[in-house]
Image (cartoon, rainbow, N blue to C red):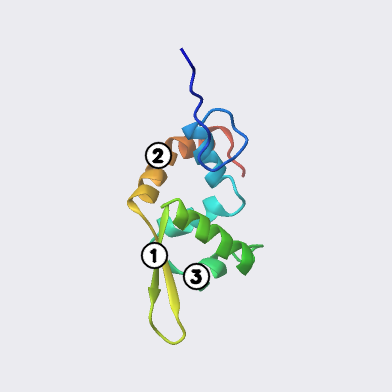
Amino acid sequence: MATHIEKDPRGTPADIFCPIGYTIDIISKKWSLYIIRELAEGSKYYNQILKALNWGLTPKILSERLKELVKEKIISKKVHNTIPVRVEYSLTARGKEFINAFKPIEKWSKKWNVIE
């Protein structure tokens, strides 16, 4: 009987697809969690996110992360046909569920890793 090994759909060198690893790959990119956290407070425009994370986030990196999170369906993008064009981002149902799934990790982190 032949054994079938699932390949990671993103083409990474992983031999076996791991859902947890896949999720960690998505959120472990610098700024991704901070962007998700910002959007957990509600929908925001591009410039609002950039301003809120003004301690090192560049426009280029923000654009890259937003595209990645939209592709993964964690956030949604709504383009307003105004002059200038405004782009609004918000969490999808998947993104909101992700926030809820992260609550136990947040609780654990507060218990064991509190920085005062």
Give, as a three-letter code, the residue at label 1.
Ser
Figure quadrant of residue 25: top right
Give the side of residue 77 with respect to residue 52, left or right: left
Residue under label 2: 101
Q: Alpha carbon of mark 3 to alpha carbon of mark 1: how far? A: 10 Å
The correct choice, above or below, for 106 with respect to 62 in the image is above
Q: Residue 45: where, in percent of width, then height?
A: 45, 71
Q: Which mark is residue 53?
A: none
Residue under label 3: 46
Give, as a three-letter code, the residue at label 3.
Tyr
Q: Residue furthest bottom?
A: 83
The correct choice, above or below, for 1 with respect to 99 in the image is above
Near-viewer residue (116 or 84)? 84
Give, as a three-letter code, the residue at label 2.
Ala
Q: Quadrant of the C terminus?
A: top right
Give SS at disc 2. helix
Q: Residue furthest left?
A: 93
Instruction: Please tell me which residue is depicted at 38% across the width and 62% down the height of the picture.
Output: 42
Q: Alpha carbon of mark 1 to alpha carbon of mark 2: how far? A: 20 Å
